[in-house]
Amino acid sequence: MMSVEEPGLLIVGASLAGLTCAQSLRAEGYTKKITLIGAEKHLPYNRPPLSKQVLSGKWNAAQTNIDSAEKFTELELDFLIDDEAIELNVGLQEITTKKHTLKYEELIIATGASVRRLPGTESMNRVHVLRTIDDALGLREALVGIKSAVVVGAGVLGSEVISALSEYGIHATVIDRMDAPQLPLTGGHFASRVNKFFLEHGVVTKYGVEIVSVSEKESGITIDLSDGSKVSGEVAVVAIGCIPNVDWLANSGLDISNGVLCDSNGLAAPHIYAVGDVARWHNPVTGKSLRLENQTSAIEQGLAVGKFIATGQSSAPTHPFFWSEIFGNKILMLGSLDAQIPLTIVHGSPSDNRFVAATIREGITTGIVGWNMPREFRQSRSMMEA
Ligand SMILES: Cc1cc2nc3c(=O)[nH]c(=O)nc-3n(C[C@H](O)[C@H](O)[C@H](O)COP(=O)(O)OP(=O)(O)OC[C@H]3O[C@@H](n4cnc5c(N)ncnc54)[C@H](O)[C@@H]3O)c2cc1C
């Protein structure tokens, strides 16, 4: 099928977006060598269950695997895991990793994002972050037998962590510099709904505050806040967003401001593509370039680039999509709700906590959300296409 000498295609980042691209290339008939380089020690796994099934103890690590090693062999995918790209030389079509120097014909950048940490807490054992399977297992272990925790960040990840803490009966305090919880793409429409869940589950909320200092003792973590108060817990979980992994591209000449800038086919430069959380794709419909951090975009971009390289065909642009599960509520979000426009209820009723809602601007649906109504949400997706 392939000669040993050919440099073939290199994918840097052996996770969802990179793997999906490799699978798409093979499905579309690409026969050259494909090598995936991954900084983690693990073969590709899904991250969404980390803050849900894994953290709450329902799944073990193996259940997050995307596919088996046998399947990867069948597809003739070579993995160099536990290695990290440190430099890209565009002129030489070459990358340098900690262990190798590798040539490429085509390069896929799929290095995702890393968690933002609270400065000064990096070496604190009781301060956790959640991005990798190792983070999730470490945090799960740290929750055993404790009674209290502080969660920094009331975004979707922080809300999922709080939800898991409540399943363990752990008393949570949440801190955020914003005035309310935030779910991505929802235009703030559900801030008070999520906050109500927090309060119903006994969560102490501290909004609109900055962190002044964090200190660690054997008994736990204490955080001093800008309003003069202190909060403490036996552990703290920091969920304050992510930063795209572009440091290794610093000397490449690519535009890496807020991710790798790409056209609508994922092309960043000749023979170089980017997919997933690290990529900022141009959307020809909105005219904007957007970096999205969700599973569906990682899959769609991986599929699109695989098809484009193998066949030269572009894929149609899609709407951003994310889902979450918070205190047992299944939330599905397509497009982006407009903060300025009241919700139109399409199915169900917010008072029953089961509904499909949309924002419609000048006859155009900008976003649609399904709240505990997955079937009706799927039926209503066509509103976005229209
Ligand atoms: C806890 C958690 C819960 C989530 N829940 C949801 C959800 O409910 N719904 C949803 O839509 N999305 C969710 N997401 C987001 C989703 O998981 C990501 O959008 C998706 O993982 C992005 O895939 P990716 O392959 O682009 O990047 P990543 O999954 O971040 O993978 C990038 C890989 O590249 C590796 N890497 C980085 N730098 C280098 C380098 N220099 N050399 C080699 N390898 C490198 C990294 O180690 C990593 O393995 C969640 C994410 C997390 C962390």
Image: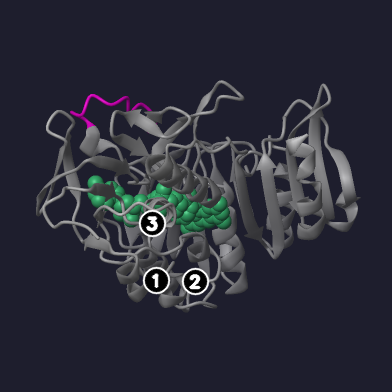
Q: Quadrant of residue 371?
A: bottom right
At mark 2, the secondary structure is loop
In the picture, the disc for residue 137 is 1
Nearer to the camera, 203 or 80: 80
Residue shown at 34% from the left, 65% from the top? 75
What amino acid is labelled 2 in the image?
Val
Q: Is residue 239 visible to us here?
A: no
With 13 as the anchor, is 185 left or right in this view?
Answer: right
Badge 2 crowding class, 10 Å Cα cut-off, few under 14, some 14 to 19, many 20 or more, is: many
Main SS, magenta residues: loop
Q: Are marks 1 and 2 in contact (CB under 8 Å)?
A: yes
The tag earlier along the polypeptide, 2 or 3, is 3
Position of residue 9 in the picture relative to residue 145 (left or right) = left
Which residue is the site of mark 3? 26
Start-end of magenta stretch: 250-260
Residue type at tag 3: Arg
Eyeballing the image, is 361 above or below 30?
A: above
Mark 1 or mark 3: which comes first in sequence? 3
Position of 101 compared to 344: left or right?
left
Q: Position of residue 338 (x, y in %)?
A: 72, 30
Q: Amino acid at mark 1?
A: Leu
Q: Is residue 310 above or below residue 253?
A: below
Please report contact status of discs 2 and 3: CB closer than 8 Å, yes or no. no
Task: Give coordinates of residue 261: x percent, y percent.
Answer: 39, 28
Q: Secondary structure at mark 3?
A: helix
Whole-angstrom CA distance, mark 2 to mark 3, is 31 Å
Q: Nearer the viewer, residue 140 or 293?
A: 293
**Quarter holding the C terminus?**
top right
> What residue is disc 2 on?
54
Earlier residue among tags 1 and 2: 2
